[in-house]
Image: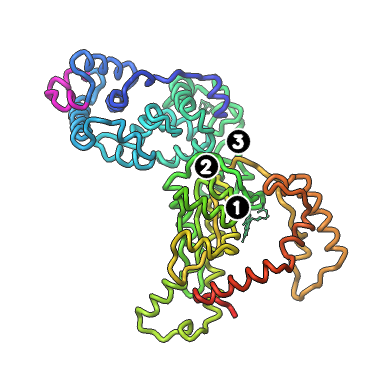
């Protein structure tokens, strides 16, 4: 639906020739009014003052009010423009571009601290001036997104922006923003949309011209949330959490789009919600976003895709903090005596569950992920790269980002082989042969080994290669064991 709207309602960008500061003033003027009134006010302002922070911060307030009168709310907007101009002059030397040149997250947070600059105004500046691939959500974009079922009816600004950004490729985001505004003004109007004239009326869940069967359910009872689209409509019935889990695959190629800070926070919080033994919480999550460190970890683990992942989280077992807490209590605990095997084992289990919770949360938010167990092979090197103190052991890496590939489901053993009822059943040689044939075929069809490691091999050969008894593995095991003993996580 969004693609159709984008093609049918093309719009040229309006801010091309304006300076960043003019765009900011224009956006403040445009609040609660239409483009015509905004433009009138802007041209009156331009004819009287230079549109610079210095000129506008020194402008007499009644003159400002007089100039911007056509934009409405002039008693609010005039002092805002004056105040914003003064802050930009005093704090940033009159150079708004110096804010926009910062990382988008940082720039956004500075901008939204300015009086009268909310998320929308900040995003307009980031999109139109700094070319950052964001979708500002104005009243038309918000209304159309809700009616189209992109987001829930009571979704807020951030939820709507993130949902749209998940659906629209970076290159098309500014055009999508402009097309949705035009579409909202001309067709999906407030309060009454022109559904009979609308090009998406056959698929839009809010269309008044469609069969009622496809309308979104309003009652809270029996509502099925579509996690991918984050809406409660009935059209995406397959996008329930379980369906998404049944279709999950590891993703190793990511789009360049950054994962928003708030999305990452939700993933981390979901990780923390994993169950844990006795409330130990003996794990630490390290977000690694230093390019040099990432590349060193990629080299140490021989998993170079790590360096290209928008987010890399290192999940560590943290015996150090656990011990410090118990020491602080003056307690004589088992780990001090080289015991407490269960606590060590459970800490590994807990950290793994946290990791999986984060991967599942990412999946439900439309992101892809891949674990990197190779950090455990290379635990010594990874610890050195990150300068870990004793007692912190890298267990798993987790790469997260928006998928740039959509691989087929990878093979799994039939349920009957791995699920037994009431007693254990030995696997048969026929089952083994059948599965290996199936897995070899599936991996060959996908070109899995060629794609990710440029090797011509089969699943069976890969399995043997990964588990062969070599001198290297015995040396590696010895050094890993020493490392785990030193760090208090030896299980034997
Ligand atoms: C504990 C663990 C460690 C893993 N380590 C790596 C790794 O180091 N590199 C990698 O490319 N994939 C890694 N994976 C992903 C597996 O290769 C992948 O899950 C498996 O091939 C099945 O594919 P699927 O997840 O797409 O179904 C790991 C997965 C888990 C659970
Ligand atoms: S069908 Fe109606 S409600 Fe849906 S997008 Fe078109 S105009 Fe808006």
The residue at label 1 has a CB less than 8 Å from ligand 1: yes
Q: Element at badge 3? A: helix
Residue 6, magenta (yes or no): no
178 to 363, vertically: above or below: above
Residue at screen point 57% across, 43% down:
254
For residue 34, which numbered disc appears in the image? none
Question: First in sequence: mark 3 or mark 1?
Answer: 3
For residue 214, which numbered disc appears in the image? 3
Q: Element at badge 2? A: loop
Residue at screen point 61% across, 47% down:
252
Residue that carries the numbered disc 2 in the rendered image: 231
Q: CA distance from mark 1 to mark 2?
A: 36 Å
Q: CA distance from mark 3 to mark 1?
A: 46 Å
Closer to the camera in the image, 425 or 445: 445
Closer to the camera in the image, 351 or 139: 351
Q: Could you tell me residue 65's position as x and y percent?
A: 17, 22
Start-end of magenta stretch: 53-69
The quadrant in which residue 22 appears is: top left
């Amino acid at each position: 639906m969004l693609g159709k709207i984008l093609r049918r309602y093309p719009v040229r960008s309006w801010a091309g020739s304006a300076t960043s500061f003019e765009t900011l003033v224009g956006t403040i003027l445009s609040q609660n009014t239409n483009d015509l009134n905004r433009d009138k006010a802007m041209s009156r302002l331009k004819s009287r003052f230079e549109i610079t922070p210095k000129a506008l911060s020194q402008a007499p307030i009644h003159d400002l009010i007089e100039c911007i009168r056509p934009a409405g709310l002039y008693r609010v907007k005039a002092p805002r423009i004056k105040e914003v101009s003064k802050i930009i002059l005093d704090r940033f030397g009159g150079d708004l571009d110096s804010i926009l040149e910062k990382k988008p997250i940082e720039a956004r947070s500075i901008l939204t601290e300015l009086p009268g600059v909310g998320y929308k105004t900040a995003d307009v500046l980031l999109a139109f001036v700094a070319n950052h691939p964001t979708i500002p959500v104005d009243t038309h974009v918000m209304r159309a997104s809700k009616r189209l079922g992109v987001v829930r009816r009571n979704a807020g600004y951030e939820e709507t922006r993130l949902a749209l950004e998940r659906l629209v490729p970076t290159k098309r985001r500014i055009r999508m923003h402009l097309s949705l505004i035009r579409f909202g003004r001309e067709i999906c109007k407030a309060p009454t949309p022109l559904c009979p004239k609308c090009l998406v009326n056959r698929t839009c869940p809010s269309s008044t011209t469609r069969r009622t069967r496809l309308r979104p359910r309003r009652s809270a009872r029996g509502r099925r949330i579509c996690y991918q689209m984050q809406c409660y409509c009935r059209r995406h019935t397959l996008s329930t959490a379980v369906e998404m889990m049944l279709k999950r695959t590891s993703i190793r190629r990511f789009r360049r789009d950054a994962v928003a800070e708030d999305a990452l926070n939700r993933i981390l919080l979901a990780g923390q919600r994993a169950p844990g033994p006795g409330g130990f919480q003996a794990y630490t999550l390290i977000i690694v976003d230093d390019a040099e460190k990432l590349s060193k970890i990629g080299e140490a683990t021989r998993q170079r895709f790590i360096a290209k992942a928008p987010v890399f989280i290192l999940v560590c077992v943290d015996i150090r903090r656990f011990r410090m807490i118990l020491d602080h209590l003056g307690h004589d605990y088992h780990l001090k005596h080289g015991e407490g095997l269960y606590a060590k084992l459970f800490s590994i289990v807990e950290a793994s569950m946290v990791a999986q919770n984060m991967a599942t949360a990412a999946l439900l938010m439309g992101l892809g992920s891949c674990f990197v167990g190779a950090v455990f092979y290379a635990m010594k090197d990874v610890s050195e790269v990150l300068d870990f103190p004793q007692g912190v052991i890298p267990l798993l890496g987790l790469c997260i980002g928006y998928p740039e590939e959509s691989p087929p489901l990878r093979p799994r053993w039939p349920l009957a082989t791995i699920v037994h009822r009431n007693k254990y059943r030995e696997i048969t040689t026929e089952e083994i042969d059948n599965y290996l044939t199936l897995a070899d075929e599936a991996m060959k069809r996908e070109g899995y080994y060629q794609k990710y490691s440029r090797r011509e091999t089969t699943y069976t050969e890969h399995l043997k290669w990964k588990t062969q008894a070599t001198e290297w593995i015995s040396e590696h095991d010895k050094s890993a064991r020493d490392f785990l003993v030193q760090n208090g996580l030896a299980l034997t």
